[in-house]
Image (cartoon, rainbow, N blue to C red):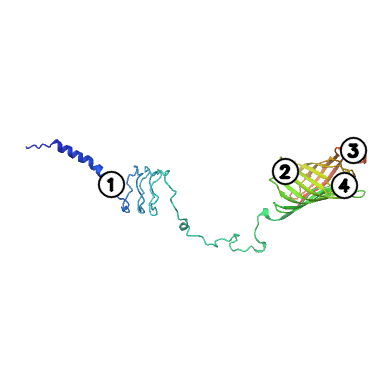
Amino acid sequence: MKKYKVGLSFIGMSSLLLLMSPLANAAEMSNMDHSSMDMSGMDMSGMDMSGDMSGMDMSGDMSEMDMSGDMSEMDHSKMDMSNMDHSGMDMSGDMSGMDMAGMDHGSMSMDTASMQGGDAPADARSSDYSNGVTYGQYDKPVMMGSAPLWGVSVGTLGYQFEDDQIDFEAEGWYGTDSNRVTLRSEGSAQTEGDKEIDSLTSLAYWKPLGIYWNGEAGVAYNTENDKSAIMAGIVGTAPYFVETDARAYVYTDGQVQLDLGTAYEWRLAQRWIVRPEVQLTAFSKDDTDNGITKGFNELETEVRLAYETLSRQLSPYVGFSYASALGDARDLRRQENVAVDSSSVTAGVMFWF
């Protein structure tokens, strides 16, 4: 048998060539132009794409690319897909583990007009939302708060047995929830003797100042001193549902009258109500001809027990009232032989509609 000996130099050269061949292939792939490669028929369902693809250029047409395989381990954070055509891509596979945190969606565009079937016609809906349907005899619909309404409220219409007089306080209004015109009158009418009627009547503009408070401004006339005045006031609900009103009257002679009132409704049952009321009157200067002194002149209080009937719009009541002169007004009334304190049982009705 013949034996062949191979030199060490040949073996070393062969090994060196085997080691350099992968490096040569990698260099050749890196210089390869992939932009013109046709991958439309390539099945990539079984490809392992879990490696680093940060430098991969996917700007070509990949409309036929099948991505139904498992791409849960694929790193998309550095992939450039800005020019990629996704219109025909099949993405029905499992993508639950796909990391899209680093994907740039800023350059993605969606043609919504084509998705919705084109732009809507200019006359798709009329400006008043009628769609061509007439309103008939009731005209156009309006919001409840913007419709002009009217109302009448009578807070006091009762008889005082001790003084033989009828007390009244009534208000009527017309307008909306934002702007109203109000007509208000309060006073008393004597049932004996000369049957005088003393009243303070005002015509004012009413407007909300906030959630719980409303403002009033207008003109007034007082039959007791036969003078007209400019009126301004604030009416609303204080904390704990206390009805509060404050009105100032500036008369033509410079006299200023301030009326402060408060009331509270305490419900004993669904329809039984106890209603206490307090009112203070003050003036800015003396007017002895009309029995007026500077400062607080009179305190009036009343407690009523009322029962609401007829959908709570009518409330008969019985009560007890007490009135007292204050400050210098007490001395002035004594000089004129007028009682400084008075009390009486009252009975009457409150209603609104």
Label 2 Cα crowd, 10 Å radius (few <14 / some 14-19 / many 20+): some
Q: Secondary structure at mark 3?
A: helix
**What is the spatial separation of the Cα atoms under label 4 and label 1, in whole angstroms?**
114 Å
Q: Secondary structure at mark 4?
A: strand
**Which residue corresponds to mark 4?**
165
| Vertical placement of residue 286 versus 139, above or below | above
Q: Amino acid at mark 2?
A: Thr
Q: Earlier in the sequence, mark 4 or mark 2?
A: 4
Quick check: marks 3 and 1 in contact, CB under 8 Å?
no
Residue 229 x/y as whole percent: 81, 49
- Which residue of the protein is positioned furthest toward the front in this rendering? 254
Compare marks 4 and 1 and give the one earlier in the sequence.
1
Instruction: Please state which of the two labelled residues, at mark 3 or mark 4, is closer to the viewer.
Output: 3
Tag of residue 331 = 3
Give the residue pinned by disc 2.
237
Q: Indicate the amino acid at tag 4.
A: Gln
- The three-letter amino acid code for the residue at tag 1 is Met
Q: Residues within 10 Å of mark 1 (few under 14, many from 20)?
A: few
Instruction: Name the mark nearer the viewer: 3 or 2.
Output: 3
Residue 122, compared with residue 84, is above or below; it is below
Q: Earlier in the sequence, mark 3 or mark 1?
A: 1
Q: Amino acid at mark 3?
A: Asp
Mark-to-mark CA distance, 1 and 2: 85 Å
